[in-house]
Amino acid sequence: MHHSLIAVILPFLGQVDLSGYLLIVFFLCVIAVIGFEFVNGFHDTANAVATVIYTKALKPVYAIPWSGIWNFLGVMLGGVTVAMGILKLVPLDNLMTLPVSVGACLVLSVLLASIIWNLGTWYLGIPCSSSHTMIGAMIGGGLVFTWYYNGPGVNWDKAGEIGSSLILSPIIGFGVAALLMLFLKHVTKSHALFHIPSGENDRPPIHIRLMLITTCTLVSFFHGSNDGQKGVGLFMLILIAFMPARFAVNHNIPNAKVLTALNQTEQVITKTITADPGRNDLLTQLNRAINQTRASLAAKSEKDVAKTYSYRKQIESVIKDIRAVIKDKKIKFSQKDRDTLTGTAAELEHVTDFAPIWVIAMISLSLGLGTMIGWKRIVVTIGEKIGNEHLNYAQGATSEIVAASTIGLSTVFGLPVSTTHVLSSGIAGAMVASGGKGNLNNNTLKNIALAWLLTLPVSIILAALLFMFFHLFI
């Protein structure tokens, strides 16, 4: 398997400038990130199929491949916004200026800590967030990086933003699912919607069945578009850590396209300075950044780390300055000029925020295949053990509608959320709305809550210890 994986990846990498042992470590990292996404498939995607299986809307033999296909499509079509948010947690700029072995330590520690905790909670059948695990591991690795190299190892602003989305999303899931369930109870006249299936042949009516299959499809797709992007982000972290000159910027974007965006920005800024010469500090700064970027664009090379690093920093500086002048209320732009600046910032962002299609395809395939294996442990917990009674159709549909909506919106805003926590809390909210607190299985909820509380500290400690271990040998 390892040899076939190397044969698949090498054509996309071109000439690999890594020594023997670093090349081995590189492919170990690639295998680890594929393993992480594979585990994520059967660990997290079980949430999407639990409701259709336990409401008898679909048999497992159909539900699992169906969910796997939609997870695959979610990653392929979901963009890279969440992936780039994950990347910004770690000190990419510092990694590019340090030996490759440092990036290897960080990547391996993050991946292995995530896999170890995910496999442990899966074995125990406890729904646990792969997102929490991975982010905790990145923080743990970043903290040790700070200790060893006396530089910023964690982007705490980004960590706070991601942490808020991870904490708020299950609370929102619980509340909205409970309200939606109460609405259905008091408004709908369909008794069939609240039926609890019993027996192998007790299947929902066709309209309810189609609704449950649709919600399962949406959760699977949005899970791929959000959780799958985390794997894409980790894969890009590997490529940038080991081959920064080649993958820190998108060399496939023609220089002429970048120059066009820079020239359009400069024209708007020059016109604005001419019209209002008294207000030109931020504008002059942006013009300076544009000129410096032109120089670094001409010098960038797929083989020169320092020049590529300089180019990346200049592009980031221009994007930051463009957004600063747009936000400045004292600088007056016409709507056309404002749209031009917004468009050029987005165009330039493609230089630094990207993932090759082959990376997205590999992560998609790993997640899709993982969905089809090992799903049963988590499905049993979701379907049977959160409540004290079997899921009815309304509870299954309600929790999945809320999960799909929450995950989809989070993907649009580039925020990673936990499918596990959103769906589990949605089911709990629907159960409470159906029969009060007594309708919940306290033992299962305690296990889920314990895993939720332990995931961050355990993954932080695991990644930190693994970083120190690998630092001795790589």
Image: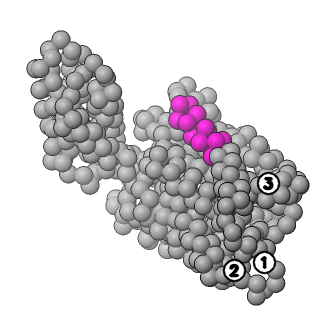
* Residue name at image x 38 percent, y 47 percent: 353
x, y percent for residue 113: 67, 50
- Using the image, tell me which numbered label, if any, was put on residue 432: 3
| Quadrant occupied by the N terminus | bottom right
* Residue name at image x 34 percent, y 59 percent: 15
x, y percent for residue 124: 81, 61
- Using the image, tell me which numbered label, if any, was put on residue 204: 2
Image: 428 above or below 467: below
Image: 4 above or below 259: below
SS assignment at label 2 = loop
Q: Is residue 86 visible?
A: yes
Task: Examine the residues drawn in magenta and state their main secondary structure.
Answer: helix
Residue 13 placement, left or right of 421: left
SS assignment at label 1 = loop
Q: Earlier in the sequence, mark 2 or mark 1?
A: 1
Residue 171 placement, left or right of 310: right
Q: Within 10 Å of the Cα at label 1, are there few (<14), some (14-19), or many (20+) other Cα atoms? A: some
Q: Earlier in the sequence, mark 1 or mark 3?
A: 1
Nearer to us in this view, 242 or 255: 255
The span picked out in magenta is 156-170
x, y percent for residue 137: 64, 44
Q: Which residue type does callout 2 highlight?
A: Pro
Q: Within 10 Å of the Cα at label 2, are there few (<14), some (14-19), or many (20+) other Cα atoms? A: many
The residue labelled by disc 1 is 197
Q: CA distance from mark 1 to mark 3?
A: 19 Å
* Residue name at image x 57 percent, y 59 percent: 404
Q: Is residue 149 visible?
A: no
Image: 267 above or below 128: above
Asked if the residues shown at circle 1 and circle 3 are in contact, with their CB atoms under 8 angstroms apart, the answer is no
SS assignment at label 3 = helix
